Image (spheres, rainbow, N blue to C red):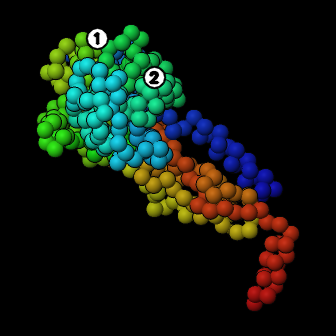
């Protein structure tokens, strides 16, 4: 009977929290921005704080390089390349126009140096050279870019090149840019080691690199990410910033000039930092650290509470924050390590905002006949 009740409680918990954990929706502000499209998101949760023409496809210029950098970071993590690898300069990469570091065919730079050229100076020739290193050719690399876009749910994006020069059919949206920006910042935070460089040099100081993101020198907490400018795209930026644990990404597409781009990005980020805060969700002191187990090789299960998960709230809501564990009275074996056994319900002013998994800290095997006899024998021997 008790086993049946435990199973029923587990089912009820799963049902109750199936729809929980969804991103919270906030009321959109009335902002006047000098650009064609814009998005502001919370990096940790992906919550959209503002959007304007967010799903309208348009050219994005060198913001394209965020995807180029993302695939490069993945190749580094997988060990397919290293920062010390030499990146060959082909005739094709040499012919790239626009922003560049004037690569010459046969010239050699390390991948680390090429990443600096891409992130700091938005070099088209360096971006294509790196694409050829990772994909074998720019054409193959572009296929990989589109595959990654589809995987990330960037449904309104199609790439035709690795650097962002205007080309028919090379389009994305403010929302899709926010998605890939969040992906690289969340899963490859080391990219900010490059995007926060203000000045550097190559060729033993002969080639100066100056960051195209002027917010690095004028906005508190800026961490990147990428600028872009072409005649088709206008003046664009995806700007990431962090203050007091609150990580934001502001995307601005289609401004008419640089001043408008910076104005729009600052307006978005200022709104975010002025109105929101990020809190780390921790286990309440009264929450149990273990739970009884029936029919297992252990009588109790140690619980694991997700540490470091952050919650986005409006400023001033922290005082009414309530975190309540939702757990059955007991569980039935077998239980796998990492298995979800309950939830932390997060509420503000009585309204549920999120729920966070409580998981099994270890495995509990089902009690077999031998284990049961052994347990009875030990109980008999114990005075």
Q: Secondary structure at mark 1?
A: loop
The image quadrant of residue 257 is top left
The image quadrant of residue 290 is bottom right
Task: Report the disc number at residue 347.
Answer: none
- Horizontally, is 37 left or right of 361 in the view? left
Residues at discs 2 and 1 in contact (Cβ within 8 Å): no
Earlier sequence position, callout 2 versus callout 1? 2
Q: Could you tell me which residue is drawn at 22 percent across and 30 percent down? A: 101
Quarter placement of the N terminus: bottom right
- Decide: is 232 above or below 342: above
The image quadrant of residue 302 is bottom right
Q: Give the x, y percent position of residue 280.
A: 38, 50
- Decide: is 383 above or below 289: below
Q: Which residue is mark 2?
A: 139
Q: Could you tell me which residue is drawn at 75 percent across and 90 percent down? A: 383
Q: Give the x, y percent position of residue 259.
A: 14, 21
Whether residue 218 is visible: yes
Q: Give the x, y percent position of residue 167.
A: 36, 12
Task: Report the disc number at residue 232.
Answer: 1
Q: Could you tell me which residue is drawn at 45 percent across and 41 percent down? A: 75
Give the residue furthest to the front.
Answer: 106
Q: Residues within 10 Å of mark 2 (few under 14, many from 20)?
A: some
| Number of marks in picture | 2
Q: Give the x, y percent position of residue 247.
A: 32, 40
As rendered, which of 218 and 290 lies closer to the eye?
218
Q: Residues within 10 Å of mark 1 (few under 14, many from 20)?
A: some
Whether residue 26 is visible: no
């Amino acid at each position: 009977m008790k086993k049946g009740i435990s199973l029923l409680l587990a089912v009820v918990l799963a049902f109750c929290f199936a729809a929980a954990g969804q991103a919270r929706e906030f009321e959109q502000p009335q902002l006047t921005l000098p650009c064609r499209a814009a998005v502001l998101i919370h990096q940790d949760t992906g919550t959209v704080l503002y959007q304007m023409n967010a799903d309208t496809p348009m050219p994005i210029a060198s913001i394209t390089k965020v995807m180029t950098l993302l695939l490069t970071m993945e190749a580094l993590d997988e060990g397919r390349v290293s920062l010390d690898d030499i990146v060959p300069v082909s005739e094709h990469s040499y012919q790239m126009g626009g922003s560049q570091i004037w690569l010459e065919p046969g010239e050699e730079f390390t991948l680390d140096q090429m990443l600096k050229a891409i992130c700091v100076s938005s070099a088209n020739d360096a971006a294509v050279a790196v694409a050829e290193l990772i994909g074998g050719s720019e054409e193959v690399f572009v296929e990989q870019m589109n595959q990654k876009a589809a995987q990330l749910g960037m449904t309104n994006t199609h790439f035709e090149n690795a650097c962002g020069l205007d080309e028919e059919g090379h389009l994305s949206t403010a929302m899709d840019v926010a998605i890939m920006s969040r992906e690289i910042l969340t899963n490859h935070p080391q990219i900010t080691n490059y995007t926060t460089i203000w000045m550097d040099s190559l060729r033993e100081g002969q080639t100066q690199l100056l960051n195209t993101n002027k917010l690095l020198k004028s906005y508190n907490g800026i961490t990147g990410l990428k600028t872009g400018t072409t005649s088709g795209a206008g003046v664009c930026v995806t700007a990431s910033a962090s203050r007091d644990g609150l990580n934001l990404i502001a995307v601005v597409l289609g401004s008419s000039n640089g001043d408008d781009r910076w104005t729009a990005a600052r307006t978005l980020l200022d709104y975010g930092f002025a109105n929101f805060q990020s809190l780390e969700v921790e286990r309440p002191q009264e929450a149990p650290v273990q739970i009884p187990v029936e029919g297992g090789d252990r009588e109790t299960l140690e619980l694991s509470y997700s540490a470091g998960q952050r919650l986005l709230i409006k400023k001033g809501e922290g005082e009414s924050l309530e975190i309540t564990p939702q757990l059955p009275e007991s569980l039935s074996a077998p239980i796998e390590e990492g298995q979800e056994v309950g939830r932390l319900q997060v509420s503000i002013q009585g309204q549920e905002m999120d729920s966070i998994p409580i998981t099994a800290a270890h495995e509990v095997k089902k009690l077999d006949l031998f284990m049961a006899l052994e347990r009875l024998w030990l109980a008999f021997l114990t005075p």
